[in-house]
Image (cartoon, grey):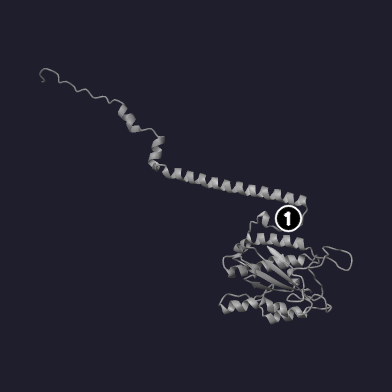
Amino acid sequence: MNIDFPPPSKGTYNNAGSSRKLCNYLEHEDMERMEQGIYTEGFFNLTDDNIYKSQVIKDIDSNIGQLLKTDAKFYAIHVSPSEKELRAMGNTEQEQAEAMKRYIREVVIPEYAKNFNKGLSAEDIKFYGKIHFSRDRSNNELNMHCHLIVSRKDQSNKKKLSPLTNHKNTTKGTVKGGFDRKNLFRLLEQGFDRLFSYNRPLTESFEYYNTMKNGSISDQLNMQERQITDERKNTDMQKGLYADKQENKTENKQSFNLPDLGLSSALGLLTPDINKEEEQIPVKKKKEKKPKRGFRR
């Protein structure tokens, strides 16, 4: 899972002014798909789908109480699953899109809110999402991803929220709370795995990627040892499963070849053959009486 916060720029991601330019960009794919008669997805938030772009712009641009002209008014977030993760989310684009919205609503926004350490919930975050189905400069078969526009202010238009702050969990000074992006990435990855029952290999985890990119030599060596251990376990498990399958096949084959003795035959194996015993006992023949000689009166 690749999640990032595009830095503000003077172009599409200029967040010091209106969100109109970014919203216009997010709709460019819809026109191409509609011309081809292909399924499209509108803007969505925590509770509603197919929200008009004009409503998104108005809602984001008006939620800027007490912000200076040069202050950020909103932030962009990219949520980009891998091909393997997308396959775990569904078989069709529509299934994957519905799964993505569920992931954003049930995992991403709730964890985003909690990560500020200000007692916020998903309902306190003003955001809109837009799903794209293709990605420039990508050769992957599946490329669905989601763009989020998140207001700098909460729903009440009172609290300032910045995911790009360097504060993490401060209790003193002007800034209270903060935002730990690394912790957020871990929680979003774990939430995805629970939601979609995804068995994530170590090499696909944020922990592995972050360690191999930013960790010390010692940390990288330890991670490689974990990788080797995990691969061995997986290999042993696969061998065990294969052996079990073969054993089951053998047992089934033997059971299939056994003669069907039936209940009477089975009883015959356990009880003596009474008829044979009777044949072995000699039967005594009655002697015929000889007639007496002489005359009878």
Residue, far front: 137
* Residue 89, x across and y down, in percent: 61, 64
Q: Quadrant of the N terminus?
A: bottom right
- Dividing the picture into quadrants, the one containing residue 92 is bottom right
Q: Is residue 286 left or right of residue 60?
A: left
* Quadrant hosting residue 66: bottom right
Residue 50 visible in image: no
The front one of 142 and 262 is: 142
Residue occupying the far right of the picture: 173
In this rendering, position of residue 92 left or right of residue 21? left
Given the image, on which type of amino acid does mark 1 rest? Met
Q: How many marks?
A: 1
The vertical placement of 281 against 54, above or below, is above
> Where residue 58 appears, x then y in whole percent?
73, 81
Residue 193 seen by the camera: yes
When the figure is inspected, residue 270 is found, relative to residue 48, above or below; the finding is above
Which image quarter: residue 90? bottom right
Residue at 61% across, 48% down: 235
**170 lies above or below 41:** above
Residue at 58% over, 49% down: 238
Q: Nearer the viewer, residue 257 or 43?
A: 43
Q: Which residue is mark 1?
A: 212
Q: Residue at x 71, y 62 (%)?
A: 188
Mark 1 secondary-structure assignment:
helix
Image coordinates for residue 132, horizontal then vertical, percent: 64, 72
The x and y percentages for residue 222 are: 74, 49
Q: Quadrant of the C terminus?
A: top left
Is 76 left or right of 271, judged from the image as shown? right
Number of residues whose C-alpha sits closer than 10 Å to that of mark 1, classed few (under 14), some (14–19) or many (20 or more): some
